[in-house]
Amino acid sequence: MAGRIITSTLNCTENTLSSYSVSGVPLTTSSFTKTFTVVNNHIFAKPPSIDLSGVSDKNSYSIVINDTGSVAAANLTVRSFVVTYTHPLKQVVGDVIAFVASAELDIANSVGKIYNYNLDETWVKADGTTRVLTIFGDEADANNAAADLTVDFQRNNSSIRIAPDGSTGSGTVVIPAGGVYQEDLVFPSTANNKTFKVIAVPVVAPAVTPV
């Protein structure tokens, strides 16, 4: 007598459990536990759920849910389901219990984090061009510590960066209100192949782009 477990997960881990079996005395020990835990810097914005539509008799199962944190407080990081089969003498072959767990970035409680960047990294023509570097992170406001990072734009390992304030060279930038920082990178015209690179800490620098 056995049933099968299927899961759908995103940005979280689960304890290993591909099937379950039942035995023992009705209404007591025939149970298993399924636990989902978020990866670092994520939360369950919606709590992990269980779906019993694939079982022959939903009344054969009782479910107890244990949470660490809460969705309401924006800090739910662990949910465990204790599933008890209440009629162990009944055949459960073919029963499928499905779980869904999807975690999201913990933006509400984040402090000083950089999430991603965007830059067109295709080859640059010899006559030059201007491309926009976009960096996403925690915004600078009174309720949320800003994410600072150092940005530089180099040609053949020499800085050619002109910052938005007109200063030159490597400099510290702060993600503004709204959570998006943008800067124009000016690729000058050149008669020979040059290598360009963007250095952003803590963001991983994009690959070197030859001209």
Image (cartoon, rainbow, N blue to C red):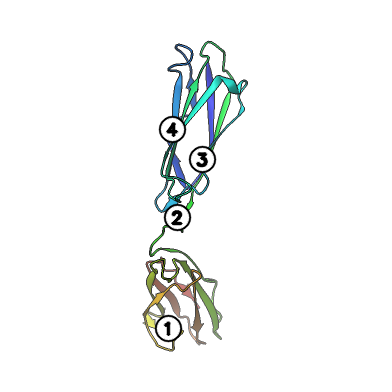
Residue found farthest to the bottom? 166
Q: Compared with residue 4, is residue 22 higher up or lower down, i.e. above or below?
A: above
Q: Compared with residue 108, is residue 123 higher up or lower down, i.e. above or below?
A: below
Q: Secondary structure at mark 1?
A: loop
Q: Which mark is residue 161?
A: 1
Q: CA distance from mark 3 to mark 2?
A: 16 Å
Mark 4 = which residue? 16
Residue occupying the point 44% across, 12% down: 24
User: Dot 1: few (<14), some (14–19), or many (≥20) neighbours within 10 Å?
Assistant: many
Locate residue 149 relative to residue 81 in the image: left or right: left
User: Dot 4: few (<14), some (14–19), or many (≥20) neighbours within 10 Å?
Assistant: few
Mark 2 = which residue? 106
Q: Which comes before the other along the chain, label 3 or label 1? A: 3
Q: Compared with residue 207, is residue 8 higher up or lower down, i.e. above or below?
A: above
Q: Secondary structure at mark 4?
A: loop
Amino acid type at circle 4 is Thr
Mark 3 = which residue? 48
In this view, the residue in front, 114 or 110, is: 110
Which of discs 2 and 4 lies nearer the camera? The answer is: 2
Quadrant of residue 54 in the image? top right
